[in-house]
Amino acid sequence: MKNNGQQGVIAAIMLAIFLVFVARLFYVQVITDSYSIWATQNAIRKVTVYPARGVMFDRNGERVVVNRPIYDLMVVPRQLDPQMDTLSFCRLLGIEKDIFIERISKAKKFSRFKASLFQAQISVEEFAAIQERLHEFPGFYPESRTVRTYPFASAAHVLGYIGEVNDRQIEKSEGYYQMGDYIGIAGIELSYEEALRGKRGVKYQYVDVHNRIVGSYKEGEFDSMAVAGEALQLSLDIQLQNYAEQLLANKRGSVVAIEPATGEILAFVSSPYYDPNLLVGSVRGKNYRTLVIDPTKPLFNRPLQAQYPPGSIFKPVQALIGQELGILKPETRYPCGGGYRMGSHTVKCTHVHTALNLEESVQFSCNPYYCWAFKNMVDHNPGHSSAAGYDIWRGFMNRFTVGEKTGIDIPNEAKGILPSVNYYDKIHGKGRWRANSIISLSIGQGEVGMTPLQMANIMAIIANKGWHYPPHFVKGIGDSLALPENFKQKKNVGIQEGYFDVVIEAMQKVVDAGTARAYGKLDSITICGKTGTAQNPHGKDHAVFVCFAPRENPKIAIAVIIENAGFGGVWAAPVASLMIEKYLLGGTKRPELEKRILEATIQ
Amino acid sequence: MRTTSRTEKTIFQYIDKPLLLLYVALTLIGWIAIYAAVYNEEHKSIFDLTQNYGKQLVFIGSGYLILTIILALDFRLYEGLSPFVYIAAMVLGIAVIFFAREVNGAKAWFEIGSFRLQPAEFMKLATAMMVAYYFSNTDITLQKNKAKFVLGAIILVPIAIIFLQHDTGSALVYFSFIFVAYREGLSSFYLVAGALAIFIVVMTLLFNEWIISSILVVIATLYVLFARKLKPAILKAVVILLPALFIIFSVNYAFENILEEHQRQRINVLLGKVEDFRGAGYNVHQSLIAIGSGGFWGKGFLQGTQTKFDFVPEQSTDFIFCTIGEEYGFVGSLILLILYGALLLRILEVSERQTTRFARVYGYSVASILFFHVFINIGMTIGLLPVIGIPLPFISYGGSSLWSFTILLGILIRLDSGRKLTLR
């Protein structure tokens, strides 16, 4: 059959359709750029690069909190070798075959293409052995991470711990934290979170349809580096801290040591304590639950939160306030007679003294003396009612951080107890109470509670003769060693420097020849201290000893509380004096005493 | 021996060089595109036989061997073999329904070890030979209804078998024989009617059938009212209107009852009735992203992110054009279309110069089959046609399709090279 132009028609139809295709391709590829944008969204992922969390050094540059590299073994189910030698792999990792099967099926359930965690937190040493043979097992690869670690296993209550953020924290952070991020949960880790966490970086990477990373985007042109968290220099002396922890082993109680000139905390022990390494990584949850149900309450931060009636350590403070108010003078004497009588009630004294002067009253801890003194401060403050007199007295006490937070840089500080005028007005009726109604306050008993931290702070104030910096753990943040502003502000209690001499003299005599002489005195260092006994309605009284040393140029102020240990001179004073030796002299010359304290168990 | 070598010399002398060159160029482009599509770092060598690109090289190599054998055989053989080839292919096509394992809902592959053979690919070739064989009887004229009927039967048999294989998409290719019929004297009315029918079907799927039919009735009424002679006008209007209305009202029935759910989805996506980037529309959406992001010049060899990272499904087979579009951009796509255009036009030229009707009809069948494959495949990847899984000739990965296209084209080249020895 002849070609009557059919060839041309067919060719024209074909070419017409090809032209439509060319037009369509021109539109899709050249004119519109929406497909390029889609392509970018498809294949480029923003990956967060986590910075190393800031480390912490103690005041002598010892590494207290560091990041330890560990390995997580990841598995991509699709890449597994079906003929893999499961048995030798299990032996390599030291796991049972059941566990292997269970983990693999769990990983498969999550995704065949994406990596799942197979085994968490393999130490560098363990991993070295695994790595040698890992190439025999395709589908497994290591991911290096870091965990917090505490070389000294010490100061858990101070340092705190970190954990994964919860939903509420994510919401509150307004986009900063993401699921799986770590955040400080307690202690310094929490209060210095912003400095420690550093700045996250961003990497843009190509991913495939299964979300697997297959390369970097434009050679990392748009990537930003992660900035490591800032290092903290702590005021703690980790050796001293460790020593204090050992001294308090098998005892319940607290030790707080402060450098008076700066407010820097040198040691801060809550006993029973725990190894901070327990609250790290994958074992944190399990160990945390064990610690929570432990009846000895190792998680309880005693120096920060336990409130004890201060007892006799109140006396030096009363002696100071009395002088400032013009009630007491060094030569002021009050009768003792074994007790201060008010009607049927008597505040007893431990001894029967002759009438003592101010210095002796502190040295021998005379209760009636301070009842008289308190009565005069409250009831006979010239021109004031009892309530107003009490309020003035309370103001001084507050400046000594009694019933006031010290402002320390770890969270959840207890403020202690010192009732206000309103409180007594409610109980006794307005204008219907006088000093005698609240006379037990004069000797640090009754409605008064102080934390060991506050007790130590009082010693710092006395050592400084009237001022202090808020106690704190951090000497400096980052390379510049910046110190938060509030720790640079000197606080004054409003008592003339001259009034301190008689009190300090008395406190030296407490140690040299008074209630703490047996175990507190040192030959080479002059210690000024005061024993106390905190009444305990639930059992044996708590032993309290506070002191500072050396008298001439105070370097350390200490409060020691040992629960249920009775009189402060027997157990608390030796702990304090051993710490002073350790801190100022590098160690004790009284090994028998040290041994006795280290080995003693007081529950 | 001496005679043979002289014959061979003559054969290769008369081989159409443009066709051969275009064939070789397309197969090599396919090989490189497959390499880029499934490239992975662990198997960088393009000759790696464990990878699809290595295997495709084997298919190409054996394809060249098959071509050589076809060219070496006596050209008169093919005409005589045609009915047997046709019957054999149809039997294989039926056999596969009984013996094949179901893959993606279709029973279309023979599996011999790791080797898979798809009879449907060879059924196209066999049908082309059979159609040519039928027309080789010079008395056949499509003016007669009998010829139309026989031709229809030759084409409907493979279509029916393919439906039974549940591989409905590739049945569309057989509509390409309308070009062959047109060349051999079928009235252009059928071509126009066919185009109109497609237009009406699309419109009906897009809009309500009542709206379309009302519009047609109005047009017919207006035509009758303004016609000079009333009677022939009414007759014409009715003759055109009735089948049109029949199509309109059977479209929805066919759409709802004959097509399968995924096919309905694909068509709805194409018509823009449904936007579904994750389900039925995923393939085309990803395909468009890959091609569209190629831009004017393309991203460069092995630089395509969308195809390389598996965003585009079936990237080495049905969606191979995406890799070319992404890595070589508009320019590369245009060059490929020009190559195909040149191939098709050359085949039409070659067909017209044949001295036998068998050879000419066969040539037109080759052009039509190839054109439909390119049309449907590229139309699908650029979102102009619904997703139908048929290969891009000479380019898509796969032995069955490459070999069947090679044989399809090879026989034409052989017939052409022997044309001067036959005068009928």
Image (cartoon, rainbow, N blue to C red):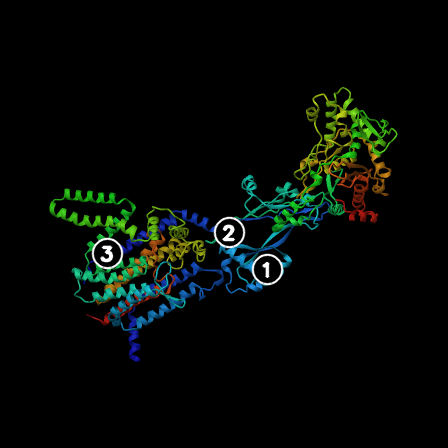
Query: How many numbered badges does the structure rendering display?
Result: 3
Q: Chain of mark 2?
A: A
Name the residue beneath numbered marker 3.
A9
Q: Give yes or no for contact between labels 1 and 2 (Cβ–Cβ under 8 Å).
A: no
A389 or A501, which lies in front?
A389
Q: Position of residue B42 (x, y in %)?
A: 49, 62
Q: Residue at x 29, y 77 (%)?
A: B6
Q: Give yes or no for contact between labels 1 and 3 (Cβ–Cβ under 8 Å).
A: no
Name the residue beneath numbered marker 2.
A205
Q: Chain of mark 3?
A: A
Numbered circle sitting on residue A95: 1
Mark 3 residue crowding within 10 angstroms, few (<14) / some (14–19) / many (20+): some
Q: Visible in this render: residue B403?
A: yes
Numbered circle sitting on residue B320: none
The N terminus of chain B sits in image quarter: bottom left
Secondary structure under badge 2?
strand
Quarter of the rendering containing residue A327: top right
* Residue at the top extreme, as displayed: A383
How far apart, in angstroms, are the residues tagged by discs 1 and 3? 75 Å
Q: Chain of mark 1?
A: A
Same-chain check, marks 3 and 2: yes
- Kind of residue sitting beneath label 3: Val
Tell me: residue A150, above or below residue A569.
Answer: below
* Closer to the eye: label 3 or 2: 2
Q: Who comes first in sequence, dot 1 or dot 3?
A: 3
Q: Position of residue B50 (x, y in %)?
A: 45, 65
Q: Is residue A589 left or right of residue A140?
A: right
- Kind of residue sitting beneath label 1: Ile
Q: Who comes first in sequence, dot 1 or dot 2?
A: 1
